[in-house]
Image: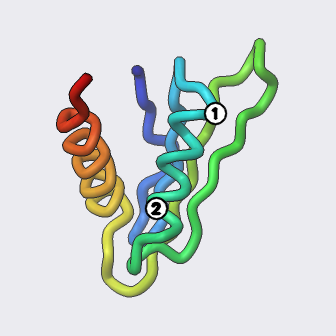
Amino acid sequence: MPVKVLILEKNELRLRITGESHTALQILRDRLNNHKSVEYANYFPGHPDLDPPEFYIRTTGKAKPDAVLNEIVNSLSSEFDSLTL
């Protein structure tokens, strides 16, 4: 999945994520909004045929949004890796 950083500031991160569905983005949004260092996280789907979704994260205090995102993604990856059938 190609990811393009649109904004990376002290406590804000905005990404454009190509090829992802609502399912993956909703899981990510839910986990981020439940993180103690995240003030707000959401995604904006845009037009389904024209625009890849954009994801926005705003953190509180000194937490860097890219570090929090990496933490959440690694946690989700570990959870999915542990699934067995």
Quarter placement of the C terminus: top left
Say which residue label 1 marks.
Answer: 22
Q: Secondary structure at mark 2?
A: helix
Give the Cα separation between the discs numbered 2 and 1. Answer: 15 Å
Colour scheme in the image? rainbow
Q: Is residue 70 left or right of residue 28?
A: left
Residue at x 32% of width, y 68% of height: 64
Mark 2, Cα crowd under 10 Å, few <14 / some 14-19 / many 20+, is many
Instruction: Say whether marks 2 and 1 touch (CB < 8 Å).
Output: no
Mark 1, Cα crowd under 10 Å, few <14 / some 14-19 / many 20+, is few
> In this rendering, is residue 79 above or below 22?
below
Residue at x 57% of width, y 61% of height: 41
Q: Position of residue 9 (x, y in %)?
A: 43, 63
Q: Is residue 49 left or right of residue 73?
A: right
Q: Secondary structure at mark 1?
A: helix
Q: Position of residue 20 (x, y in %)?
A: 54, 25
> In this rendering, is residue 42 above or below 47?
below
Residue at x 77% of width, y 32% of height: 46
Say which residue label 2 marks.
Answer: 32
Q: Position of residue 72 (x, y in %)?
A: 32, 55
Relative to the observer, which residue lies in front, 35 or 81?
81
> In this rendering, is residue 29 above or below 37?
above
Q: Position of residue 2 (x, y in %)?
A: 41, 22
The mark nearer the N terminus, 2 or 1, is 1
Quarter placement of the N terminus: top left
Q: Mark 1: which amino acid? A: His
Q: Give the residue furthest to the front.
A: 85
Relative to the observer, which residue lies in front, 4 or 46?
46
